[in-house]
Image (spheres, rainbow, N blue to C red):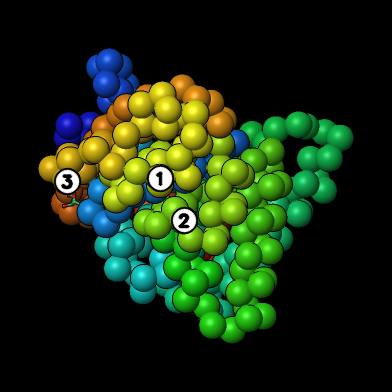
Amino acid sequence: MPLPLPVDEPDLVAVNIGVRENGFPWLTRVAGRHLLVAGATGSGKGGVTWSILAAIGPAIHDGLVQVWVIDPKGGMEFGAGHDLFSRFAYDTGEATLTLLRDAAAILVDRAERLRGVSRQHVPSTADPLLLVVVDEIASLTAYITDRKIKAEVEQLLGLLLTQGRAVGVSVLACVQDPSKDVLALRQLFPTRIALRLTEATQAAMVLGQAARDHGALCEQIPDSLPGVAYVAEDGSAEVTRVRAFYVTDDDITRISTAYRPPVSGLGGLGGSCHGSDH
Ligand SMILES: Nc1ncnc2c1ncn2[C@@H]1O[C@H](COP(=O)(O)OP(=O)(O)OP(=O)(O)O)[C@@H](O)[C@H]1O
């Protein structure tokens, strides 16, 4: 399915990113949610991520959402779209650490401000939704050799995942091998999307055994169907088979140009839009 034109004011709790097997739109929640996208190489993790970024593009442009990207593979996956990102770290060292520290600082600041005032953050230009995208979350920690940095990265990720949702900090993470240690964190992702996986056991690791028993046969998704996945929400046994939109390189160039974030109006997120790691 080709990528449709995004709606002008996307609903951040029902973002249209593909189709369900019953023909209805595949709507996913971005505000107040963390999303985990798991899949073998070439299964379509980048495609799912770009379907989400494309759909929320107008909100990025309007300053209601800021996207901060960590691409530990050296910027390979997301470099082409960097104009869309307010922050972009493509190392496994200082830039990544700084980005995570800054995201955590925003979280703590918002938690202070919202305490006793509101139970759920509402994105605004003054206080945008912060979407932290991590490509290959397992390699983020696996490639870091410095033990101190690694421990801090894990601690910061844990903080974002446990306390981010109510204060408008969402994490969208991709992973190729769900058996890696870091996926101790997977319970903290309410929305889990499992694309083609290489081993039968991996679907249960991502979606839970009950979902696997209810037909999430990720290892049987053919190579010829990238973007096809099973989705489980909130640990439910119910799974839905879906297919993400097909996002071409031209789409990525078009989206990144059309929906650049505003340079000013950083609201509560402070700092420079095009930081040293951009
Ligand atoms: N929904 C889709 N429909 C059709 N083709 C798709 C879809 N999603 C991805 N593809 C195609 O499948 C290929 C692999 O997709 P993608 O790069 O997103 O996979 P990946 O899981 O991110 O791979 P890697 O782990 O190697 O980075 C690409 O050529 C892409 O254009």
231 relative position to 160: left or right: left
The amino acid pointed to by label 2 is Ser
Foreground: disc 3 or disc 1: 1
Q: Position of residue 14 (x, y in %)?
A: 45, 26
Q: Residue drawn at (27%, 21%), measured in percent from left and top?
A: 21
Q: Residue drawn at (17%, 35%), measured in percent from left and top?
A: 2
What kind of element bears circle 2?
A: loop
Residue 63 in the image: above or below residue 271:
above
Q: CA distance from mark 3 to mark 1?
A: 18 Å
Q: Which residue is mark 1?
A: 201
Q: Earlier in the sequence, mark 1 or mark 2?
A: 2
Q: Quick one: label 3, few (<14), some, or many (20+) residues within 10 Å? A: some
In this view, the residue in front, 232 or 204, is 204
Q: Which residue is mark 3?
A: 223
Q: Residue drawn at (32%, 27%), measured in percent from left and top?
A: 241
Q: Which residue is mark 2?
A: 179
224 relative position to 221: left or right: left
Q: Quadrant of residue 176?
A: bottom left
